[in-house]
Image (spheres, rainbow, N blue to C red):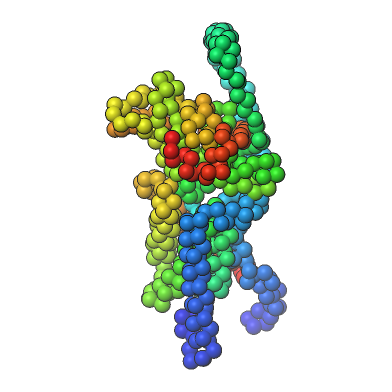
Amino acid sequence: MATARPGWSRRAQYGLFFSFLAVIAGIVIGLILLIISLVAPKTFDGIRGAALDVTGPVASALHEVNATASGLITGAGDYWDAASQNAALRRQNHAMLQRMVEAKAVFQENRQLKAALDLRQQRRDTVAVGRVVGSSFNSPRRFAILSVGSSNGVKIGMPVRSPDGLVGRVIDTGALASRVMLVSDRSNIVPARLLRNGIPVISQGRGDGTIDVRPLEVGRNPFKRGDILITSGTGGLYPPLVPIARIVKLDDDGAVAIPLADPSTTSFAIVEPPFEPAAIAAGAPASTDSP
Amino acid sequence: MVRAALSSKRLNQAPPRFAVLLPAASVVVASLLAALPIVSTSGWYPDFGFLALIAWRLLRADPWPGWWAAPLGFINDLSTGYPIGFSVALWSGTMLALDLIDRRTMWRDYWIEWMLAALLITIDQGLQWRVAEAMDAAPAFTKMVPGLVISICVFPLVAWIVSRIDAWRLGR
């Protein structure tokens, strides 16, 4: 901007005055845009997607470099304590084998029971598989950037999971990348239940990588440390029986949980179609409010 | 002495053609740092674009015409995923506020500039939190404090980098 004291020149004075007006116009335009994006968030979907197409591939490329470098380091580290790791893995393997036999038996029994009940096995399709390549690391919101976009069939509102558990849902899509609202975002509310006893609960992010869990029915605190949360499928957006989080701390009327799918270590994220497509048509936020 | 100055090779060397655009370009680059493959679940990293903006503005009164703050903020909104319009309004407001402060302050030193920057960063983070609250997505405000402290501590580093870029662009 011009200097504070333009002197006697009328031209310089006007120049200063108009530059002030231009800045004030900038503020007003910014406020109008902000109000639009608060009131009608869908207005800017197109331009946000276009911006993702610029930044997303850059993040993907840098992520590859980063993954290669850290892979080399951890690879070297693995050699370093190979002997002790080997012993631990053998022990683990032995325990796993026993569990697997049990699981096979349960699986068979399950199949027989399902056949008896004439239940149709629901097949889950995969829309796209991508990597988590970035995040909103400088904002109070918890978003992640995924390396797949609408050219892979990703649409706004689709649930995203990893082999470990639920990651979140898609909120912006570009052609090459998409933005995912993580389960730890404050406005991401997931209808869930406890794996141990099936008590229905509500999971809501806390904005710092953890999750707040509240029981649907007011009364005794049903949580224990180590409890696993799974999605209930209520609302139709998230598929049922996807693990979400493990409870680490109890508080007065609920508990704090840590997501099982840590976006910083998740190697692959799977985009799935919404459990009931009508849920997206009805508007994603409304469907999550009513568990 | 005069002869020595004339024989210097620095004579007739103007700053490079892009010197006028360099401050704004460096703010854009700082905004695009949001594309770094950092996956954080805490959100404590600083808002690099805003830090670069106030570092340039505190270093020079006219790094760019004031209204440029609006498009620069727009780029920042797009690259960081903030609600569109947030940085547009905040950055324009910052330019206006610093112009008004420039008229009032009698003297400046590093400490006052850092305090001023800390104040602006606090306003930035506080408004981000307010906007998140308006979207029913605000975490407890105490969760914002570590990020705020980190940003304030990182500011001198950004200011140093900006001053190096400034010296380089002016050929000093």
Q: Vertical placement of B92 versus B34: above or below?
A: below
Q: Is residue B78 left or right of residue B110?
A: right
Give me the residue at 53% from left, 83% from top.
Answer: A15
Name the residue rendered at 69%, 41% in the picture. Answer: A152
Is residue B94 in sight in this rendering? yes
Q: Is residue A220 left or right of residue B115?
A: left
Residue nearest the viewer, comparing B172 with A74: A74
Number of disc labels = 0
Which residue lies at the image location 34% right of the left edge and 25% below the top edge? A222
- Residue A283 image position (x, y, % from top left): 52, 45
Is B105 or A176 nearer to us in this picture?
A176
Q: Residue B136 in the image: state x and y as whole percent.
A: 41, 48
Q: For the C terminus of chain A, which image quadrant?
A: top left
Q: Quadrant of residue A170?
A: top right
Q: Is residue A205 above or below residue A21?
A: above
Give residue B9's position: percent from left, percent from top. Answer: 71, 74
Residue B119 is left or right of residue B56, and the answer is left
Residue at image point 57% right, 64% down? B72
Work out whether residue B129 can be spotted.
no
Q: Position of residue A243 (x, y in %)?
A: 50, 27
